[in-house]
Structure formats: C-alpha cells, structure tokens
Image (cartoon, rainbow, N blue to C red):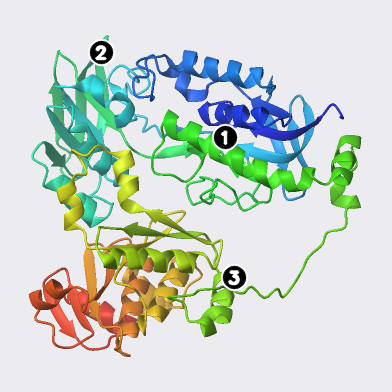
Amino acid sequence: MEKNYYDVIIVGAGPAGLSAAIYMARAKYSVLVLEKEEIGGQINITAEIVNYPGIKSISGPELTGNMKVQAENFGASFMMARVTDMKLDCEIKTICTDKGDYRTLGVILATGANPRKLGFAGEQEFQGRGVAYCATCDGEFFTGKQVFVIGGGFAAAEEGMFLTKYASQVTIIVREEDFTCAKMVADKVKAHEKIKIVYETEIMEVSGAGKLNYVKFKNNRTGEITEYRDDNGFGVFVFAGYVPDTEWMPADVEKDGQGYIITDINRKTNLTGVYAAGDVCVKNLRQVVTAVSDGAIAATSLEHELAHVLENREIYDEVKSGVDLNKNREQKITNNQTVIHDNLEFVPEEFLGKLAEIFSKFESGIYIRLWRDETALSKEMEKCAKEIAGLTDKISVRDAIKEMEESYSDSVFSESDKKMLLPAMEIARCSGKNPEIYFHGVPGGHEFNSFIMALYNTAGPGVEVDEQIIREIKSIDYNVNIKVLVTLSCNMCPETVMAACRLATLSDYITAEMIDVMRFEEIKNKYNVMSVPCIVINDHDVYFGKKNIEEMLGLIKAI
C-alpha cells in the first residue's frame, strides 16, 4: 500500500478522535490520527475527572494517555502535524498537512471546541482556580459556596439550574434586560428559590490570593459598581458559548452560524465519507463521555460506509496502487428515481411528490424534538414525526425528555416537571437559534399542510414575506407566546397556524404553538373555546377567527 494512503484519517486526538481511532483500528482499517498540539486536547488541563463512568477518579492526561495506548495496540498510527487544507468533496480525499499530503477514503473530524472567553481582568489567571466553564465538570467543587453564572442564554440558564445542586446560592449575571433563551426555560430559572438574577450587568474583574475571592460587576444602565468578597472562595462560571475549531476548514463542510459542524444522528456530515465527532459538532452536552460516544458512533457508521467500497477488490487495488479514482472511475448517477413508501399512516400518498419537492429546497437540516409522556397521543405523535422524517435525510427526530434526563439530574428535571409539559412536537434547527414552534397534537387533516410549511419555514428559505413586515417583526423586543387553538377539520385554522409559525421563525421573541383542542379538553375549557381558530396571546388576550401574518402582527403590537 502506498505510504501516504490510509483507509481512515482522524483529525484531532482528543477523547472523540481517540475513541474513533480505537473503533476503526479494531475493525482492521488502517488509521492515521493527526494532532496539531498534544494528545488529549483540552481535557489535559483537567487535574481530576470524577464523573467518567466506571472510573472513580483519574486525571485528564492519564485517561487520554490510556486511550492512545489502546488505539495503538489495535494498530492506529499517530502523527503530530497541523492540517492546512482538505479536499473532501471526492471519493479519494486528500488531507494536506505541514508534514505532507495524505490520501484516504474516510475522514473523521474531531477538532474540538474551546469555551469562549470574555476577556475580563483575571479571567485567564484564575481559570481552574475559581473561574470555570463547565457546571457538570466543576460544579461539585463549589459545594456550599456562592457561585456567579455569567450569561443570559440557554446554557447559562440550564447550567445555573444545575449548579443549585451544589452552591449555597447561584447569582446569574445577565448583560441584557432579560434572558435570551426560551421563556419556558427562563421562567423556571426565575422561580428557583436558590437563584438570584441581576440584569443589565457585566463582569469586570476577578482576583484573589491563590484562589478566587474577589469579583467586580458593573451595571451597564446606571454605571453602578458592585463588589463581592469572600475569603473562603467562590465560583464564577462563564457560559458565553464555545468557539469550534473549524474556521480553517473548507466551506463545503456544512456548519451552523457559530461554526459547529452539522451532522445527522450517525455523526455523518453533508459530505460522503466525512464524519465529525465530539465538541466540534452541534450538540447539547460537551463532556468526555459524550465525546467518546460520538467517536464510536462516527467510526462504526463510517465503517459500514467504507465496507461497500472495500468489498470491491478492483477499486481497493486501484486505491493501493495510487490511482486517482476521482478521475478514473466512472461516476454512476441515477436520476428520477421513484421511491415507494409502504404502510404510510399519517402522510397522504398523493402528497409524496410535492413533499419531495419541498424537502429538496431545504437550506439546512432540521429536527423534530418529541416532548413525550405516557399518553396514547404522545405515542401517536412520535409515529407521525418518524414517518415524516423517514421521507428525507434533512429531518431527524430527537427525544427532548431523554436529552434533558441525560444532561441533568432528576433533582433539576423532575417527574413533576415532565407532567407539566403538554405532549408536543417541537420544530428546531440543527444550527442557529431555534424558532420556538410546538405542535400539540398530530398534524393531520388540514393541519398537515401547516406542519409541513413550519418545517419549510424553519429549514429555509421559507415563504416570502414583505420586507416592511419583516422590519416590523424584527422590531419586537419583548416575549410573545401565540397559542392557536384548532380542530383538524377546520379549513380556516391552517392559515392562522402558518402565520404564527412564520412569525416565530422570523423573531427571537415569538413562540408559536398549535393546540388541537379536541385532544386537550382542559385548554378548551380554560378559554371557553366554542369556535376555532382561537388565538391566545401570552395566556391572556384571546381572539377568534382566521388571521394572516399581517393581522397576527397587529394583534401582537396591540398588547
């Protein structure tokens, strides 16, 4: 085999890359792992890991050192080299490094992400000595102490909730006038007895003698300075997001607005033979345990994909001899294929052609998050979501409750919390801010169209909206929840639902919910609904009758 060819090249030797190397090498593929700095990645700065399953306590370098030895024992090769370019949109891919170029059939990108630093005085000096960036990793070390959480987004809200397990009190410092995350999440934080929230405020400085014991804040509106001192120490947790190591990657690797690589459930990117794993991916939890899981998933998925290529001995021999398959192998493309879907229960068969056309226009991947309970309705909604997602690779289905349970302890996300949630299908983007769209009920009948249009508007490009209306929507800077109460037999309801959902996709402050009142008797009774569509804004103002987007906008501006 030519010296610069490997079946698989893994870029990055953190936990995700090391896990992928173990699985690929054990499957008897030739594997090269490229790392630009040091084996282990940012986990090497962790002196003690106490939440890795099966290991009571271990240091970061020791854990990843063991992983490297394990991968080498299975035959993986390692090289310290900086990747400077990649050619991935072809069958035989080229990885260009400062040590030479390498050819491969499969690539796993595991370059990681680093916590975003704010740059306040003392931040770098006290990192690991009071300044932290991961509640799951470091929260336990602040048991019984005061903790400050810096940030007003989803991560700050959720991690602040998690820290109440350990801290005597959690004070969340929000730069804006309110949280920027979903109202449902923010309201739960605001109601917690151990959490104090300070708005329009930024952190200016931290200091201490050996450990953090001083912090200074500034109110951006009044200019007031607040100081806090505690000789026993306290914590400052910064949740200003992460910075993925993807800026240097070619544009044909699909990424979200923050630069994270977009993958499907198998960690496959938009490119054939290219997978991603670990913190570099769009994901909810960034931990060693999820990184190694990603690596295993990416490796086993890539293994199945490569098996089809390597089964063809003629192709494999060409690869070994250095022949460029991208020039010498005839590409076979079959157009206008007709796919027959059997046993459709929720999707009308006559809609399949139109759905294929709509899905082909999607600009980005999206997913349906299932907020499930034990009711028959919940099970029916799950089947519907999976059936629709089964028609395209641009839609995936996720279990919201399971994600929350896996990310946070039962004391944070309890059984009582679950019972408060209506069964719902949430439409969410794989990248960027989610539009806050929920369907409470199975979108059958006339509402099937409004559900499909909500998917299209979320994935983009979406239904065209007048520029003046868009400007008016963007001017809304307060939280608005729109509930559209419908029945599936109403032919006036879909337009109203579509208007609410389109508003939600165009505004960071608007939440849209479709509720089938025939499934939710208590909602019907609460608002004395005897006609649909019924529009409830912020659980207070009630309107009836069909509304388009402009009319709906008028209702919002009137509150």
Q: CA distance from mark 2 to mark 1?
A: 33 Å
Q: Which residue is mark 2?
A: 211
Find residue 39 and report its image quarter.
top right
Q: Position of residue 441 (x, y in %)?
A: 29, 72
Depth check, front residue: 52 or 259: 52
Q: Position of residue 158 (x, y in %)?
A: 26, 42
Q: Position of residue 545 (x, y in %)?
A: 22, 89
Note whether 554 is above or below 7 in the view shown.
Answer: below
Q: Quadrant of the C terminus?
A: bottom left
Q: Which residue is mark 3?
A: 360
- Lower position in the chain sequence, tag 2 or tag 3: 2
Q: CA distance from mark 2 to mark 3?
A: 55 Å
Note whether 489 is above or below 387 in the view shown.
Answer: below
- Residue 376 seen by the camera: yes
Find residue 231 and report its image quarter.
top left
Image disc number at residue 110: 1
Q: Which residue is at the far front? A: 343
Depth check, front residue: 124 or 13: 13
Secondary element at tag 2: strand
Image disc number at residue 35: none
Q: Quadrant of the N terminus?
A: top right
Q: Are marks 3 and 1 in contact (CB under 8 Å)?
A: no
